[in-house]
Every structure is written in structure tokens, then in C-alpha cells.
Amino acid sequence: MASKEAKISLKAAKGTRDWSGSDLLLRDHVFDTISNIFKLHGGTPLDTPVFELREILSGKYGEDAKLIYNLEDQGGELCALRYDLTVPFARWLAMNNVQQIKRYQIAKVYRRDQPAIARGRMREFYQCDFDIAGQYDPMIPDAEILRVITETFETLDQEIVIKLNHRKILDGLFAVAGVPADKIRPTSSAVDKLDKEPWDVVKKEMVEQKGLPEAVADKIGQYVLNKGTLDEMIQFIRSDENLSANEEIKAGLVDLDLLSAYSKEFKTFDKISFDLSLARGLDYYTGVIYEVIQKPQGNKEESRYPGKPTKSKEETSAGVGSIAAGGRYDNLVGMYGKKQIPCVGISFGVDRIFTILKARQGDKAGRSREVDVYVMAFGGKEFDGLLLQRMSVARQLWEGGIRAEFSAKVKPRLPQQFKAADGVPLAVILGQDELGDGKVRIKVLGTGKNAADDKKDDEKDQGLLVSRDDLVQEVKKLLRTTTLPIR
């Protein structure tokens, strides 16, 4: 007897999810908010393939390269799913010889990471990127990127901190501490874990896995566990004669002096925390680097300049971690073409931002669909469903640019219609007598109250009686002026 076929496991693959209903509408709200900010700053949209040649992606991500999804050989090309949107953008710049652009892209990326869906860490997730490519005077594009970050989260009503560092300062700091040149990148990857691990764990990794002498690790700790405002930390670095004598650090401080002045003019200065522990593990960064986190609740951030080196886990207080990140990468495009094109950019983690906004909603459910009006009908024993009339009203609303639905049944019952209208703010109700006079009723759903408070008591439960000719105008007025319970 033939064995039964194995039962298919009906679930989304690990680290992925389906989007529907109110979740999808909330995510689209985030997309719209971010893309509108990008457009305000002159952004041009770009779309690139979901997979790239492996050689395009290789050597760009440091220790995180192990997270790249490699694809099987199909037709003689070795490909991989894109890890981020930055490297494909650099490839596009070099391939098309584009010298200057403000570009934005909203698309999925893929990482073979250990997922934690509750904290917004996925294997398939969206990034929203904004980058400025081209030759400009120092730090002006960088300052504008910080302004884009601030505007975006202000629009989303999120309090944030922009953690910022400079790759030249960090590399110079490692050199001053005694880190050999060939160990700077591995050491940087270890330091980058300080937002998740305490110092003693990171120090142990430096000594036991990266091969640094304990004295060198201790010296690193004296530096990287300090943070404060831009001006405080510039002063802190300049007050250390060993740091201030390093040429790379000197170059980084010149940049940060400019950034301090520009950020005050753009009103982003107070959002910035210059944090010497921020490393960003990606190999292609060359200048300013930054990560955005939720502003810690219940405890004010205190400057650690010039106090004792202590490190808290405040950055992950909400369990989500960074919600946007980026930096300057001046040499990446040159890896693919003959010309170097300096670039600086930011990438917003939509799934993590969604997780925060969803948690803020709490038990209050958002709308599961974007419908403004449900067209319904009822009557007595001779009621035939008024299907053609409901179709006519729906068409009238659609032609007026109003999102509307009606029951796809010839003779629907009234309770079924109200159930189908769940989540819709307004109903247009058809009755045989009213239609004979060329009129319909508009009712606000969800409260049991009528939208026309000045009408007679006997009309309140039935809705506002309006002419068919005025229907679109009256519905738009209600949608625009009335506080609706579900909108």
C-alpha cells in the first residue's frame, strides 16, 4: 500500500513574515513618510535587482560576509541575494558613470542572520536608503543626511539619539592604543558589539580571539567607553596629547568641527551623541558613521566626558537596537570603476521602526483596510436588496475619488452588511422611500451617533439625509471635518 504523502508545513520561512491588513497599512505609512522626506531633499528614486554577482558583494561586509545568501549556479553566473542597498548603488554609479545624484531606494534585503521577529530582526526585511553621491565641500552632505534623519523621526513622532563617530578617529585611536594595522578591522568589529555586550566580554574577545595584548585592550577601553556632545568629545580628544598628535585623528577632527557648526544650523546638534564605541562593522566606511536608536526612557543620557569608562545597555532598552544607520563611503564606487565618487548615506530599518510603532499602538487596533464608505440597503417585506441602486451609488462615490465598497449579494441582510462594514468610518444607507425622492442617508459608524448633531432626534439613529446630487460633496465634507472613530 502506498505511503501517504508528507503533510506540507504551512508557515512562512524562518525569519520572514506575511504582511496584511492593519500591519501592512502601518508599514505603508512608514514608507510614505520616509519617501516624502527623501523627495523634500531632492531625492531621485532607483530600483536595482534583488540579486547581484557574488564578486560585486564580496569583500565589502567584513565579518558579516557570512550572512550573505549565495544562490546556486544558474547559467554560468555565481550570484547572491543583496545584503544591503549601498553596494548595488555603488555598482550602478560606476556602471553608468553617474558623477552626482541624490538617490533613494526602498526595497527588500536578505541576511542569513539568527532572526528575532519580536525585536524586528529578520532574514528578509526592507531598507529605505537615501544617499548623496558626488564631489562637494566637506561635511555639507553629511550634515544634510543628519537633517533627513531628524525630520523623518520627528514626522513619525519618535524621540531618537543619533550615535555618531568618525572612522578616521576610530582607526587613529586604535593605532595610538597599539593595535597593529592588520588587526584594526577585527578590533573594530569587536568594539562594535559594545551596544550588546559589556566591556569585559568585548575585551575577552579582543585578547583571546583577536590576539591583542591585554594592555592594548585596556588602553582601547580607556578611549572607546566615552561619549558626549560633539563639542565635548572634540575637546576630550584634543585634550589627550597622544590622540591629538595622530594624523588620522587630526583629519577627523577637522571634519567634526565643520559638522558641529552645520548641525547647529540644521538644528540636529542636540540629537547627536558622539560615541567612541560606535564602529559599524562594514568595511567600506571611510568617514563619519552613525546609528539611530530610540531615546532612552526614564533616564537622561549623561555625558561620559571625561568620567570613568562605564558602558550601559541603554541603546537596546526597547529590545530593538538601531533603527537607522549609515555613514560616508568615499572609496566604494572606485572598486568597480576608474573614478572615485564620494558618497554618504543613511538606511532606515523599516521592520524595526514598524515594531516600535506597533508596540506604541498597544491594544488599539489600526484600520485593516483603506475604505471610507460602505454602501448598504435595507427595507421591509418587499425589500429586494436594491443591488442596482447600491451599484449606482458605489460608482458615483468611485467617480468622486472616494474609496467605497458594497455587499456582493443580491439581497444581503442588514446585520451582515454592518459586519462587513467593520473598520469603515462611514455608511451610505439606501431605503426604498428615500431613493424615490432622490435621497440617501450618511451615517457615522463605530459610535452609534449621527454626524449631524443639529438634526432632529428621530433622525439621529438613521443618519443624515442628503440628496444623491450632493452625496459626494457631503461625504468628502464628513471625511475632512468630522472626528471619525476608526480613521
Image (spheres, helix red, strand yellow):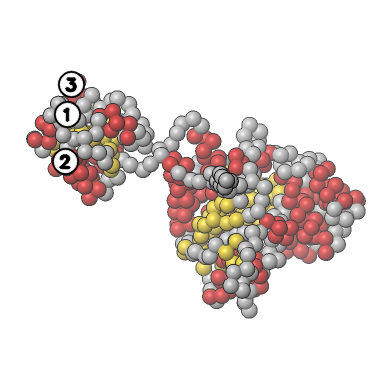
On residue 458, the disc is: 3
Element assignment for label 3: helix
Mark 1: secondary structure: loop
Cα distance between the residues tagged 3 and 2? 25 Å
Q: Nearer the viewer, mark 3 or mark 2?
A: 2
Give the residue type that dot 1 points to. Answer: Gly
Percent position (x, y) of residue 233?
Answer: 72, 50
Name which residue lies at 75% across and 54% down.
Answer: 189
Q: Quadrant of the C terminus?
A: top left
Residue found at the very far bottom of the displayed protein: 338
Closer to the N terminus: mark 3 or mark 2? 2
The residue depicted at 21 percent of the width and 35 percent of the height is: 411
Instruction: Tell me residue 351's x, y (percent).
Output: 55, 47
Given residues 177 and 424, the one toward you in this image is: 424
Q: Which residue is mark 1?
A: 379
Contact between marks 1 and 3 (CB within 8 A): the answer is no
In the rendered structure, find residue 343 and report the number of the disc placed on it: none
What amino acid is at disc 3?
Asp
Frontmost residue, 171 versus 122: 122
> Is residue 440 depicted above or below 203 in this figure?
above
Q: Residues within 10 Å of mark 3 (few under 14, many from 20)?
A: few
Q: Residue at x 49, y 30 (%)?
A: 363
Q: Residue at x 28, y 25 (%)?
A: 449
Q: Nearer the viewer, mark 1 or mark 3?
A: 1
Q: Nearer the viewer, residue 220 or 231?
A: 220
Label 1 vs label 2: CA separation? Answer: 13 Å
- Identify the residue position indicated by label 2 in the image: 389
The residue at the far top in this view is: 457
> Which one is earlier in the sequence, the residue at label 1 or at label 2?
1
Assess disc 2: are there few (<14), some (14-19) or many (≥20) residues with their C-alpha within 10 Å of its C-alpha.
Answer: some
What is the x, y in percent for residue 234? 72, 53
- When the figure is inspected, residue 226 is found, relative to residue 166, above or below; the finding is above
